[in-house]
Structures are given as structure tokens and as C-alpha cells.
Amino acid sequence: MNKSYTEQMEEALWQKWSDYDTDAEYASTIDFLNAEDGFRSFGDGLVALMQKKDPSMDTDKAIAHLATCCKKNGVELSKIGSTNTLKSWFKSGPRPKKGEDSRDAMFALAFALEFTPDEAAELFHPVYLDRAFNFRNEKELVYYFCLANEKTWLDAKRIISSIEYDAEVCDAT
């Protein structure tokens, strides 16, 4: 049975547990946590998630597969990232920065790969390292609805564009 990345990391930390008895400064544990290869890259996490749908997936096939999925599911690849950004992700480059644009890119990625809401949450939590589905954000509520009901990216964009906003919002909590 293949262990998940999280299970492997937990096991490695438990193996380090015995060091606590002899290493009063916890230096070896801190070194372990700060090691460059201690945590997987965004691209590695994304490939692991893609492998759940296609076990033959690997880093070399990821961009081509993503481009095919985008075409098939009506998502512009540029909504996820530029070619250079994608190459960087899959070569252990920097992960996407936190922000509204990156969140939208993650949702575009979820629609391209036909994720369920649970799979999208898995993309956000252990891969992108942020929470998924802010239900106070109307766009993200629409994304959730569309993913849960097997609607397309274009359906989500159409629904979002039809939302009317009240100019006089009195949000007193």
C-alpha cells in the first residue's frame, strides 16, 4: 500500500521522537523541519493529486495532460498559469502566491481536472496550503455549487457574471 505524503512525514517525525530524549535543544528536529527537501513542492503535490485520477500520471506528462483537460473542459490554460509558471511548478519551483488571483487559478485547475468539492478541498489544503471554499465569497460559493453539481467552468463564470450587487450593503456584524 502506498502511503500518502502526510503519512510518510508523520512517520518520519515519530522516528525522530526518540531524539527528544537525548537532544535537549531539539536541533535535529528543527533541522529536519527546515530541510529544503522536508516538504514537497506544489508541483509534486499536484502530480500526487492528479495520480489519484490517473495512476500513470507523472511530472513529465503533467503539463500536457493539464492542457488536454483544459481544452476538453472549456478552461483556458492561461487562467491557471502561463507556460513558464506551469513548468516552474513541476520543476519544484515556487508555489503560487496567496491571493485572489491564485485562488481563482486553483478553482480553474479544479474545473479543468473535473474535481469534486472534496478533491478541490484536497487541492487547496495540503497542496496549495490554504483553506478551500470561502462561503462568504459569492464566487467561491458558485464554484462549490458548480463542482458539486458537475457544472462546467463556463457555467460558473456565467452564474458569477449574472450576480447583481446591492449598492447599499449594510454589513453590521
Image (spheres, rainbow, N blue to C red):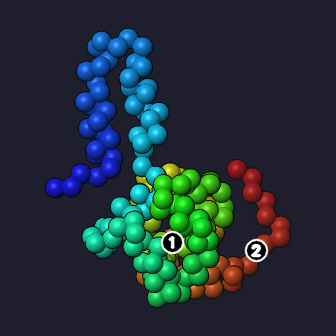
Q: In the picture shown, does residue 8 fall above or below 60?
A: above
Is residue 13 something that shows in the picture? yes
Q: Which of these two is toward me, 147 or 165?
A: 147
Tell me which amino acid carries mark 1: Leu
Residue at point 42%, 14% (across, down): 25
Q: Which residue in the protein does label 1 denote?
A: 109
Q: Secondary structure at mark 1?
A: helix
Residue at point 30%, 39% (across, down): 10
Few, some or many C-alpha atoms within 10 Å of disc 2 (few <14, some 14-19, many ≥20)?
few
Tell me which amino acid carries mark 2: Tyr
Q: Which residue in the protein does label 2 denote?
A: 165
Q: Position of residue 147 (x, y in %)?
A: 46, 75
Left or right of 130 on screen, residue 21: left
Is residue 123 something that shows in the picture? no
Q: Which of these two is toward me, 99 or 55?
A: 55
- Image quarter in which the N terminus is found: bottom left
Q: In the picture shown, does residue 22 fall above or below 75?
A: above
Between disc 1 and disc 2, the foreground one is 1
Q: Secondary structure at mark 2?
A: loop
Few, some or many C-alpha atoms within 10 Å of disc 1 (few <14, some 14-19, many ≥20)?
many
Q: Which of these two is toward me, 87 or 10?
A: 87
Left or right of 42 on screen, residue 161: right
Q: Which of these two is toward me, 1 or 89?
A: 89
Residue placed farthest to the left in the image? 1
Residue placed farthest to the right in the image? 168
Residue at point 42%, 78% (across, down): 65
In primary-sequence order, the first of circles 1 and 2 is 1
